Amino acid sequence: MKSLITDVELLAAALTQVRVTVYEKDESIADYGGVIERYTPESVKIAGTYFMREVYVFKTGSTRERPE
C-alpha cells in the first residue's frame, strides 16, 4: 500500500479515482474510505466525511478501483 502524503499524491489519487483507505497513526483502519472528493492543506474529504491530514494517514493499494 502506498501512503498519500503530498498534495500531488492526493491529486493523482483523486483524478484517477482510486479507492483510498483512512488509517489512524497506529496503523489501525479508521475508515474503509472510498474516492477522494476534495482535499485542502488541512483535510481530505472521502465519501462525504472530512479527515484531518495531521491526524490520519491515507493509503491506496496498487490496484485501480473505480466506483460504479
Image (cartoon, rainbow, N blue to C red):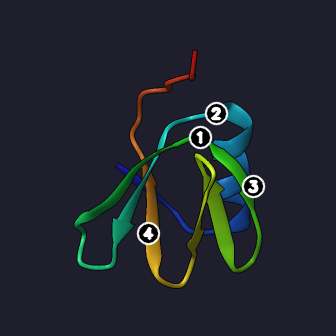
66 shown above or below 3: above
Q: Quadrant of residue 38?
A: bottom right
> Looking at the picture, which amino acid does disc 4 mark?
Val
Using the numbered discs, state the Cα–Cα distance from disc 2 to disc 1 in whole angstroms: 5 Å
Q: Which residue is mark 4?
A: 57
Q: Which residue is mark 1?
A: 35
Q: Earlier in the sequence, mark 3 or mark 2?
A: 2
Q: Indicate which disc residue 17 carries.
A: 2
Q: Which residue is mark 3?
A: 38
Q: Residue at x 72, y 65 (%)?
A: 7
> Looking at the picture, which amino acid does disc 1 mark?
Val
Give the secondary structure at mark 4: strand
Q: Indicate which disc residue 67 carries.
A: none
67 shown above or below 16: above
Crowdedness near tag 1: few (<14), some (14–19) or many (≥20) residues, C-alpha within 10 Å = many
Give the secondary structure at mark 1: loop
> Looking at the picture, which amino acid does disc 3 mark?
Arg
Task: Give yes or no for contact between labels 2 and 1 (Cβ–Cβ under 8 Å).
Answer: yes
Task: Give yes or no for contact between labels 4 and 1 (Cβ–Cβ under 8 Å).
Answer: no
Q: Residue at x 56, y 22 (%)?
A: 66
Give the secondary structure at mark 3: strand
Using the numbered discs, state the Cα–Cα distance from disc 1 to disc 3 in whole angstroms: 9 Å
Q: Position of residue 41 (x, y in %)?
A: 75, 77
> Looking at the picture, which amino acid does disc 2 mark?
Gln
Crowdedness near tag 3: few (<14), some (14–19) or many (≥20) residues, C-alpha within 10 Å = some
Using the numbered discs, state the Cα–Cα distance from disc 3 to disc 2 in whole angstroms: 11 Å
- In the image, taking residue 2 as reference, residue 17 lies left or right, namely right
Q: Position of residue 28 (x, y in %)?
A: 22, 66
Using the numbered discs, state the Cα–Cα distance from disc 4 to disc 1 in whole angstroms: 15 Å
